[in-house]
Image: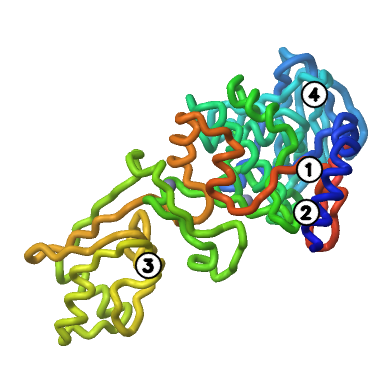
């Protein structure tokens, strides 16, 4: 079988690939910053040592740690000023720390945003009357920044490790998301939240311990590592939500999240609101007592795709969206003139259940066990392995670092 052949070749080549890894420079990501606001001015300082400034590809000087450079846009061109420098009329500025361990600090004076710091370089280009900011950052540093912003503080090391693997995997799967805009991923919830450099040692250790590891399916294709807050005891097949079947996103039973903070929810509506909504949206007939009973007293044993057994069918994913419910996994109970929806879980339910994974980590499961619990038949491989097996269908092409 082709897959088995690929895996056996993989095993033979593993030592070679591991040696190759040692000399491989981290791949770079281009992350668009603060895309949800209009930035007309930034102040950039060096966090350690000095930082070099390149204007349209030419080095124009350095900014010391005690100085800062203010960048604005004037008539569609950039202007940069520091104590020592005055650069005007250019199309691109690149700020690059001189020390390998250096980083940049950035402030946006027009906003109340706290100062952020970034590893790698900062590319600034004019975009009509605003600035486009792109952080060109090593994948591992970006992964650590995302884990800090997405996972939060004080989790178990194994939990941070699996977050590192899934954030890294997500970054590679979604590398084309913003290509027409001149970068790969944005720094908001649209892609993955990224507020710059990771300052948490525990997260950095977890990222280092999983260096370059990503998840692939049995065809060595990088997976869509989707996750949600709490599955309510049962995860969802990918095709039940998005119509696209993925062999690794299968419904599975999960007992680890049942006592977690988002395990249950409740919402009360008036009987009129509930039936009125079903009538308007799905043309539900309320004259038939069996139909009424099916939508007023409904208790699913497992996750359903549709509410009750009524015609026309009522897709639960639409009910969730319309009524802004935490999940599609809920029962309905009629109590006098009220209707109580009692739900389980929080989120779409596909892929990894975060609260279940946190619990598994606390109970002593390794991050690989946890990933295999939520993603069926996946493998952890080094990114270099993907490059080796790359074809049209495999990992997306990697853009070369800009300004290198
Ligand atoms: Zn995005
Ligand atoms: Zn769960």
Give residue 304's mark: 3
Distance from the alpha carbon under mark 2 to that under mark 1: 9 Å
**Is disc 3 in contact with disc 4, using a CB cutoff of under 8 Å?**
no
Is the residue 189 above or below the residue 101 in the image? below
The residue under the point 76% across, 20% down is: 102
Q: Residue at (81%, 28%) from the top-left corner? A: 96
SS at circle 4: strand
Expressed as whole percent of the image width and height from the top left, the position of residue 282 reads: 32, 80
Kindly tell me whether residue 148 is visible in this rendering.
Answer: no
Task: Please state if 175 lies on the left or on the right of 292 as rendered.
Answer: right
The residue where tag 1 is placed is: 383
Contact? badges 4 and 1 (CB < 8 Å):
no
Query: Which residue in the protein does label 2 denote?
Result: 395
Residue 367 picture quarter: top right
User: Within 8 Å of ligand 1, the CB of disc 1?
Assistant: no
Name the mark nearer the viewer: 2 or 4: 2
The residue under label 4 is 97
């Amino acid at each position: 079988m082709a897959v088995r052949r690929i895996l056996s070749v993989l095993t033979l080549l593993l030592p070679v690939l591991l040696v190759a890894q040692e000399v491989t420079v981290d791949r770079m990501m281009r992350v668009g910053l603060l895309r949800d606001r209009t930035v007309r001015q930034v102040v950039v300082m060096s966090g350690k040592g000095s930082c070099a400034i390149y204007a349209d590809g030419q080095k124009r000087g350095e900014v010391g740690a005690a100085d800062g450079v203010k960048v604005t846009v004037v008539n569609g061109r950039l202007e940069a000023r520091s104590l020592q420098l005055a650069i005007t009329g250019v199309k691109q500025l690149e700020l690059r720390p001189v020390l390998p361990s250096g980083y940049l600090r950035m402030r946006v004076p027009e906003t109340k945003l706290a100062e952020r710091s970034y590893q790698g370089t900062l590319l600034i280009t004019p975009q009509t009357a605003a600035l486009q900011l792109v952080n060109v950052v090593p994948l591992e540093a970006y992964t650590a920044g995302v884990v800090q912003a997405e996972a939060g503080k004080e989790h178990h090391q194994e939990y941070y490790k699996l977050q590192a693997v899934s954030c890294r995997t997500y970054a590679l799967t979604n590398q084309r998301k913003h290509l027409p805009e001149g970068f790969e991923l944005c720094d908001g919830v649209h892609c993955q939240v990224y507020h710059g450099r990771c300052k948490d040692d525990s997260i950095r250790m977890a990222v280092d311990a999983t260096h370059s590891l990503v998840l692939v399916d049995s065809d060595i294709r990088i997976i869509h590592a989707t996750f949600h807050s709490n599955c309510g005891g049962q995860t969802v097949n990918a095709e039940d939500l998005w119509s696209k079947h993925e062999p690794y996103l299968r419904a599975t039973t999960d007992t680890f999240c049942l006592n977690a903070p988002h395990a249950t929810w409740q919402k009360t509506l008036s009987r009129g609101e509930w039936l009125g909504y079903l009538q308007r949206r799905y043309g539900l007939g309320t004259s038939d007592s069996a139909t009424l009973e099916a939508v007023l007293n409904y208790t699913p044993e497992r996750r359903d795709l549709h509410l009750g057994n009524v015609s026309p069918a009522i897709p639960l994913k639409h009910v969730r969206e319309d009524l802004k419910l935490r999940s599609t996994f809920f029962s309905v109970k009629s109590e006098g003139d009220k209707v109580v929806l009692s739900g389980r879980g929080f989120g779409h339910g596909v892929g990894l259940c975060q609260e279940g994974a946190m619990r598994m980590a606390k109970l002593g499961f390794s991050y690989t066990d946890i990933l295999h619990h939520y993603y069926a038949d996946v493998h952890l491989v080094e990114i270099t392995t993907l490059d080796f097996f790359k074809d049209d269908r495999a990992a997306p092409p990697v853009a070369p670092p800009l300004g290198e």
